[in-house]
């Protein structure tokens, strides 16, 4: 069993990283229309966001694994585990879609992959809250 301090650190890091990964995407989606006419500024904004977002994504992965072991996921009922595996799939989809978004050269590709990234991240966050409130 973790000490209360380590439990707090684990949850703090996970929520902080989710705030940056998920919340940052929402903020960026709100800012991009204001600079859309200027490709240089749009690209600079995206690059700066990526400097924060990708490390946050990897912190999410690490603390997510830590969370799984901290709550003894193998001892949870099958419904809880099913939600967990769906969440893991959504997290991986969000990362893959974000990577594809960074590689996209077309406006349609940017829009599709950006949308998939954000929607899967939001769904993963929702499922994480479901899991946390049912322990």
Image (tube, helix red, strand yellow):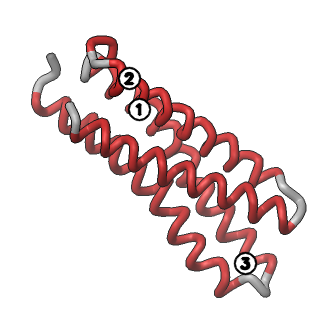
Q: Nearer the viewer, residue 104 or 90?
A: 90
Residue 24 appears at what percent x and percent y?
A: 50, 63
Q: Identify the residue at image location x=78%, y=84%.
A: 38
Res 75 → quadrant? top left
Q: Could you tell me if the residues under marks 2 and 1 are in contact, i.e. CB atoms within 8 Å? A: yes
Image mark for residue 81: 2
**Measured Cα–Cα span from mark 3 to mark 1:** 40 Å
Q: Earlier in the sequence, mark 3 or mark 2?
A: 3
The residue positioned 65% from the left and 70% from the top of the image is 45
**x, y percent for residue 68:** 34, 23
In the image as oriented, which residue stretches furthest toward the top? 74
Task: Indicate which disc, 3 or 1, sits on the residue closer to the N terminus.
Answer: 3
- Label 3 to label 2: alpha-carbon separation: 43 Å
Residue 43 numbered mark, or none:
none
Q: Residues within 10 Å of mark 1 (few under 14, many from 20)?
A: some
State the residue position of label 1: 83
Image location of residue 123, percent across then percent down:
48, 49
Q: Which residue is mark 3?
A: 41
- Assign a secondary structure to mark 2: helix
């Amino acid at each position: 069993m973790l000490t209360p301090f380590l439990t707090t650190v684990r949850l703090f890091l996970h929520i902080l990283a989710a705030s940056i990964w998920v919340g940052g995407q929402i903020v960026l989606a709100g800012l991009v229309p204001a600079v859309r006419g200027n490709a240089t500024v749009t690209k600079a904004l995206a690059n700066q966001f990526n400097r924060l977002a990708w490390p946050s994504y990897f912190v999410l992965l690490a603390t997510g694994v830590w969370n799984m072991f901290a709550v003894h996921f193998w001892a949870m009922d099958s419904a809880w585990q099913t939600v967990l595996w769906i969440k893991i799939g959504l997290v991986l989809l969000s990362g893959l879609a974000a990577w594809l978004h960074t590689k996209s050269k077309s406006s349609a590709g940017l829009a599709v992959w950006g949308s998939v990234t954000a929607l899967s991240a939001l769904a993963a966050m929702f499922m994480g809250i479901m899991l946390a409130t049912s322990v």
